[in-house]
Amino acid sequence: METLDIRPGSRVLEIGSGHGVALTLVAARLEDGQVTGVDRSGKMLTAAAKRNATAIEAGRVRLVHGSWPDLDEVLPGEGLFSHIFAIHVPLFRERPDDCNATIRRLLAPGGTLSVIAQPLADADVEPWVEATTTAMNAAGFHTLPPLISAHQPVRTACVRARVD
Ligand SMILES: C[S@@+](CC[C@H](N)C(=O)[O-])C[C@H]1O[C@@H](n2cnc3c(N)ncnc32)[C@H](O)[C@@H]1O
């Protein structure tokens, strides 16, 4: 969560929010902002809704059923997000150009895109960072230096890009 630099009024989008664990952590850092979780699985959204019921009622968390990168119908004319992040979702593996177009449409100028993972083995951290950095740069982003946590036994990595 520290890597995301969430501020009290941030407008955040998580792609592939799953059970909604990160949504809970982000919502706790918001005062008047909102975090939206998009997932293509209705089952995951149900679990996320249960976990985040209080924050949903307070307007801090919003859940949307949709499939990345085809979000035009579920986030139509959506205002801009200050942060977009994804944890354990292979965002750029398929259709990188569509991913780029969608992120540029949804991310505010100066906003950050963060792609995060904790690989199964610690030895896979650097290869994951390299592959993700390469994929993001190939998709037209200029990545920032990666952030790698000191978690044991397996570190967590975050590859970020800021969009002007
Ligand atoms: C491995 S889980 C990770 C969940 C959560 N981010 C976490 O780290 O606990 C991947 C999630 O992303 C969702 N997902 C994968 N590809 C997606 C896509 N193209 N559009 C929307 N959701 C997607 C899956 O339904 C699943 O809930």
Image (cartoon, rainbow, N blue to C red):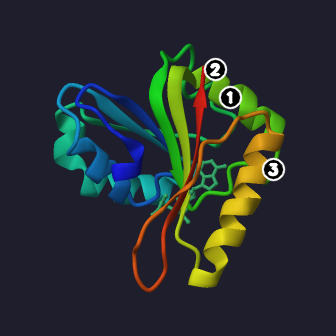
Check disc 1 and report its element: helix, strand or loop.
helix
Against 108, residue 17 (above or below) is: below
How many angstroms separate mark 1 from mark 2 (CA)? 5 Å
Residue 56 as seen in the image, left or right of residue 20: left
Query: According to the image, label 1 marks what residue?
Result: 102
Q: Say the numbered circle drawn on residue 86.
A: none
Going from N to C along the chain, the mark reached first, 3 or 2, is: 3
For the residue carrying disc 3, how many other residues have a C-alpha within 10 Å: few (<14), some (14-19), or many (20+)?
Answer: few
Please, what secondary structure does the residue beneath circle 2 have?
helix
On screen, residue 86 above or below 7: below
Q: Are marks 3 and 1 in contact (CB under 8 Å)?
A: no
The residue tagged 3 is: 94
- The amino acid pointed to by label 3 is Glu
Q: Secondary structure at mark 3?
A: loop
Q: Is residue 106 above or below residue 150?
A: above
Q: Residue at x 46, y 58 (%)?
A: 18
Q: Position of residue 90 (x, y in %)?
A: 68, 57
Q: Residue furthest front?
A: 145
Tell me, for residue 105, which label it has, or none: 2
State the image coordinates of residue 124 (x, y, percent, origin top left).
66, 78
Q: Specify the quadrant of the image occupied by residue 162.
A: top right
Amino acid marked by disc 1: Thr
Task: Tell me the CA gap for discs 3 and 1.
Answer: 13 Å
Residue 1 appears in view:
no
**Mark 1 in CB contact with mark 2 (< 8 angstroms):** yes
- Mark 3, ligand 1, within 8 Å: the answer is yes
Q: Position of residue 118 (x, y in %)?
A: 52, 70
- Position of residue 57 in the picture relative to residue 127 (left or right): left
User: Does the closest atom of ligand 1 sit within 8 Å of the Cβ of label 1?
Assistant: no
Amino acid beneath label 2 = Arg
